[in-house]
Image (cartoon, grey):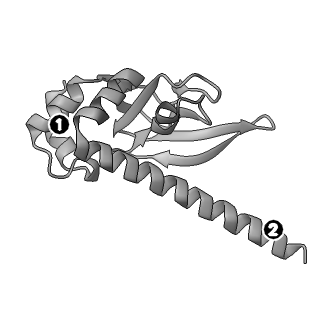
């Protein structure tokens, strides 16, 4: 089954420049997992034990507040999910579920760390994407705070 994803991964920005042989080694360090729509892959507050790469379908990152789910973002194929909690050694800040039938590549925290240590190019791209996401969230928060403060004037 993993052979079917080798070529597909080479077309994703995260793996640009990788050969099918290179993506095979990335796949072999994890486990491919099928997810039904609605499957919760991890929950807010859980220990960070895995990192996911969306291979097909779509995942939703959400939090539950006031008895309802608030979707923070959708994660399409090619996106890494759950890496920040693993990298920082903290509990999950949000939950993740399959928004539709999906396939993910799952790495344990140990497998993910080993992958980043042995593949500098992938490591740089994962950190770049994670930092961009954090900066975008910070900007959004600042804009919402400025907008709220301005509305009260």
Left or right: 120 as drawn, with respect to 56: left
Q: Is residue 139 visible?
A: yes
Between residues 63 and 91, which one lies in front from this camera angle? 91
- What's the residue at 38%, 39% (across, down)? 57
- What's the residue at 58%, 30% (across, down)? 90
Disc 1 designates what residue?
Answer: 23
Q: Is 120 located above or below residue 90 in the figure? A: below
Give me the C-alpha separation between circle 1 and circle 2: 46 Å
> Mark 2: few, some, or many residues within 10 Å (few <14, many ≥20)?
few
Q: Is residue 105 visible?
A: no
User: Is label 2 in a helix, a strand or a loop?
Assistant: helix
| Residue 88 percent coordinates (x, y) | 52, 35
Find residue 77 and report its image quarter: top left
> Mark 1: few, some, or many residues within 10 Å (few <14, many ≥20)?
some
Disc 2 designates what residue?
Answer: 148
| Residue 81 percent coordinates (x, y) | 45, 38
- What's the residue at 40%, 46% (across, down)? 76
Between residues 73 and 45, which one lies in front from this camera angle? 45
The label shown at residue 112 is: none
Q: Earlier in the sequence, mark 1 or mark 2?
A: 1
| Residue 92 percent coordinates (x, y) | 59, 31
Left or right: 29 as drawn, with respect to 64: left
Left or right: 135 as drawn, with respect to 126: right
Between residues 150 and 128, which one lies in front from this camera angle? 128
Q: Is 25 located above or below residue 152 in the figure? A: above
Left or right: 17 as drawn, with respect to 101: left
* The N terminus - image quarter: top left
| Residue 153 percent coordinates (x, y) | 90, 78
Q: Which residue reaches farthest right?
A: 153
Find residue 118 and report its image quarter: top left
User: Is label 1 in a helix, a strand or a loop?
Assistant: helix
Q: Is 34 located above or below residue 101 in the figure? A: above
């Amino acid at each position: 089954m993993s052979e079917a994803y080798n070529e597909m991964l080479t077309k994703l920005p995260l793996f640009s420049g990788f050969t099918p042989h290179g993506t095979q080694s990335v796949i072999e360090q994890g486990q491919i997992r099928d997810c039904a729509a609605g499957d919760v892959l991890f929950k807010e507050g859980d220990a960070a034990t895995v990192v996911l790469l969306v291979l097909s379908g779509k995942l939703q990152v959400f939090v539950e507040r006031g008895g309802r789910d608030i979707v923070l973002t959708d994660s399409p194929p090619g996106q890494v999910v759950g890496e920040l909690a693993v990298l920082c050694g903290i509990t999950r800040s949000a939950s993740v579920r399959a928004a539709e039938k999906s396939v993910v590549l799952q790495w344990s925290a140990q497998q993910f760390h080993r992958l980043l240590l042995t593949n500098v190019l992938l490591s740089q791209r994962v950190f770049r994407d994670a930092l961009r996401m954090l900066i975008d969230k910070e900007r959004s928060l600042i804009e919402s705070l400025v907008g709220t403060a301005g509305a009260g004037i």
